[in-house]
Amino acid sequence: MSKVRLADLVSCSATEWRTGYGGAISQKHVDFVLCEPDTTRFILAIELDDRTHDSEDGQRRDRFLNEVLASVGIRLLRVRARSYYPLPALRSLVHEALRRLPG
């Protein structure tokens, strides 16, 4: 799946909504999500990191996303944004990330 809302991957309690986490979650997206074909269970999120991720705000957003996804057991693969991705290199990155999955 592409351009998936973080709120479609994770949820939070009413208390967490009131403390601001819900709003933060509802306003974020991940670039791609890979799912198990038979169950559609989320198994890998992929973020394409362009130069906006180098800014202080971008790094703060990245830390938040890293922590949220880790808390629900969704592995995150970060890939530097490019205008072109050689398919073998991209396939290798994804396969390596999937090999590191537990179970």
Image (tube, rainbow, N blue to C red):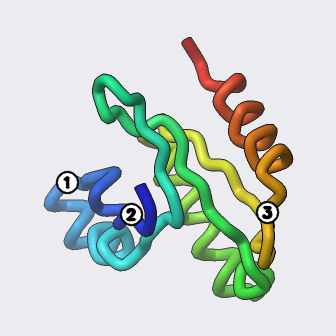
Pointer 3 local density, CA inside 10 Å: few below 14, some 14–19, many at least 20: few
Which residue in the protein does label 3 denote?
Answer: 85
Q: Which secondary structure lies at badge 3? A: loop
Q: Which secondary structure lies at badge 1? A: loop
Q: Nearer the viewer, residue 35 or 19?
A: 35
Q: Which secondary structure lies at badge 2? A: strand
Query: How much space separates mark 2 and mark 3, taking CA atoms?
Result: 21 Å
What's the residue type where badge 3 is placed? Tyr
In which quadrant will I find the N terminus?
bottom left
- Name the residue rendered at 79%, 62% in the picture: 85
- Name the residue rendered at 19%, 54% in the picture: 13
Q: Locate residue 32, reporting x and y percent.
A: 51, 58
Q: Earlier in the sequence, mark 2 or mark 3?
A: 2
Please identify the residue farthest to the left as the structure is shown: 14
Judge left or right: residue 99 versus residue 11.
right
Which residue in the protein does label 1 denote?
Answer: 13
Tell me, for residue 74, which label it has, or none: none
Height in image: 83 above or below 88? below
Height in image: 45 above or below 52? above
Query: How much space separates mark 2 and mark 1, taking CA atoms?
Result: 20 Å
Q: Quadrant of residue 49?
A: bottom right
* Mark 1–mark 3 CB contact (< 8 Å): no
What's the residue type where badge 1 is placed? Ser
Q: Locate residue 62, reporting x and y percent.
A: 63, 68
- Name the residue rendered at 55%, 12% in the picture: 103
- Name the residue rendered at 70%, 40% in the picture: 94
* Mark 2–mark 1 CB contact (< 8 Å): no
Which residue in the protein does label 2 denote?
Answer: 4
Query: How much space separates mark 1 and mark 3, taking CA atoms?
Result: 39 Å
Q: Quadrant of residue 6?
A: bottom left
Q: Earlier in the sequence, mark 1 or mark 3?
A: 1
Q: Locate residue 4, reporting x and y percent.
A: 38, 63
